Image (tube, rainbow, N blue to C red):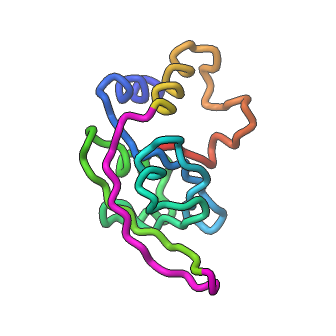
Amino acid sequence: AEAEAEAGADTGVCGVGITFKLRMDGHYHVKALAEGGPAQLSGQVDIGDIVVSVSGISIHHLSHAQLAQLVLGPKETSVELVLLKRTPEGELTTCPAVLVRAELPSLSNLSGQSDEGEQPSSGSSDGSEPGMRVTV
């Protein structure tokens, strides 16, 4: 899996700058937005939104790798997300968001760290629950 990640970094794969967190119910929600990333700049995505689908495919119970494959892609191509947002009245409303993929400094930083080989295992010591989050 590490070799795949390195190859992906070299081929200029781009994302939208969302950190997804998988909840116990199998839904992904937006944990963080990359500073200056497409999601933040669009104003269409908010922290706490539940992401229902990517490009028309439901992401409920998908693995992090499957989610990353759906979101990542060539620079300046678009990806459509369907989000569940909570209104001020507490209702959930469905909102489509179309984001244009861009190069993300944080993604290259992540791959740069794994290239050093200090942590060959899939475990990470930064305390950020590596199995539960993915930034794409």
Q: Report the residue at 27% width, 38% height from top.
A: 75
| Depth check, front residue: 81 or 4 | 81
Q: Position of residue 29 (x, y in %)?
A: 57, 61
Q: Report the residue at 36% width, 29% height from top.
A: 8
| Depth check, front residue: 63 or 33 | 33
Q: Report the residue at 44% width, 77% height from top.
A: 94
Residue 23's quadrant in the figure? bottom right
Residue 14 drawn in magenta: no
Q: Which residues are magenta?
A: 88-104
Image height check: is 50 above or below 69? Answer: below
Image height check: is 134 above or below 116? Answer: below
Left of 125 or right of it: where is 93? left
Residue 52's quadrant in the figure? bottom left
Q: Position of residue 19 (x, y in %)?
A: 55, 48
Residue 101 drawn in magenta: yes
Q: Report the residue at 34% width, 64% height from top.
A: 57
